Image: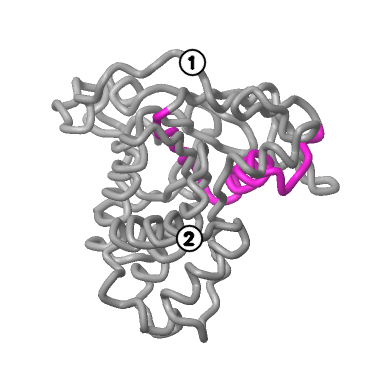
Amino acid sequence: MPGCDKKPSAAPPNEWDAKPPVPEEAFLRIEGVSYRFDAVEAVRGVSLSAPTGTIFGLVGSDGAGKSTLLRMAATMLKPAAGRIQIGGLDVVRDKAEVKALIGYMPQRFGLYQDLTVEENIDFFMDIFGISGAERKARKALYLGFSNLLSFTERQAGNLSGGMKQKLGLACVLVHEPKLLILDEPTNGVDPVSRQEFWEILGKMRARGMTILVSTSYLDEGERCDRLGLMHRAALLETGSPAEIRALFDNLEEAIIHRIREADGALAQDAFKMERE
C-alpha cells in the first residue's frame, strides 16, 4: 500500500459523487455508543446517523470495532453506553419492534447448504409468515434482483461464493426491512459478483431502504453516500467519500493520512484495504 509522503492535491471527479441530495431526516441514529469484551474496548463513544434511503459505509482496520457496532445496531449486543435508534425506536427498549424493521447479514450468513436456492428462500419466508400472492411476488422479485431465477433447483452448497452471498441477501430482503445491515458482505467475492451485489444495493436504496454496510474495498466505499472511518474502537471521521478525499489523490491516501494522524506508523501495518 503506497504511503502519503507527497503533498495532498485535488481528487478527480468520481461518477458516484453525482448523487441526489441526501435527505436530512435520520432513520438510523447512533449516539455515544460503547462496548467492551471484558478488558478489551471494542467500540468507544461512536456517534453517526444515516438518513432514510442512503448507504452509510464503515471502513477501517481489522479489529477496529466495525462488526461489534453492526451487531449492536442489529440488536445482537446491548450497548454498554450510549443509545441506538432505528426509525425512532430504541434498540434496547423496543427490541422486538426494531427487529421487524431490520435485516442483518453477518460475515458468515446461515444458508442451509443441502437445501436448494428456492428451499432456502422459502424457509426464510416461512419464518416471516409471508404467504399467498405476496410470497410468489417477493420470491420472483428478490431472486430476480439476485440473478438466481435460473438456479432455483441448485443446492446452496454448490453455488459459487458470489452466488451464495446474493442468495443470502435475497433471504434477508424477503421481509422487506427498512434498514439493511451488512457486515463485509463481499469479502472474498470475485469482482463481477461484487459489482452485481452493489447493483442490488443501489436498487434497494432507490426503493427507499437505508443501508449500513462495512467493507474492506475502497471502490465500494466510493459508492456510499457517507463513510465512517473506524480505528482502534473509535470513529475517526465521517463524511461523503468526496469530502474525505477532498485534499488527496484518492480515498486510500486520505484514509492513511487520517490514521497516521491518530496512530502514527500503525497506518501502514494495521490498516490494509483492498483496491481493485
Q: CA distance from mark 2 to mark 1?
A: 35 Å
> At 60% from the left edge and 24% from the top edge, which residue is drawn?
29
N-terminal label among 2 and 1: 1
Residue 132 numbered mark, or none: 2
On screen, 237 above or below 95? above
Residue 25 numbered mark, or none: 1
The region drawn magenta spans 53-80
Residue 129 rendering spot, x and y as whole percentages: 60, 58
> At 29% from the left edge and 16% from the top edge, which residue is drawn?
21
Type of amino acid at the residue the image marks with label 1: Glu
On-image quarter of the C terminus? bottom left
Residue 192 rendering spot, x and y as whole percentages: 22, 62
Q: Is residue 172 left or right of residue 12?
A: right
Type of amino acid at the residue the image marks with label 2: Gly
61 within the magenta span: yes
> At 31% from the left edge and 50% from the top edge, which residue is drawn?
200
Q: Can residue 266 be seen here?
A: no
Residue 209 rendering spot, x and y as whole percentages: 43, 36
On screen, 199 above or below 87? below
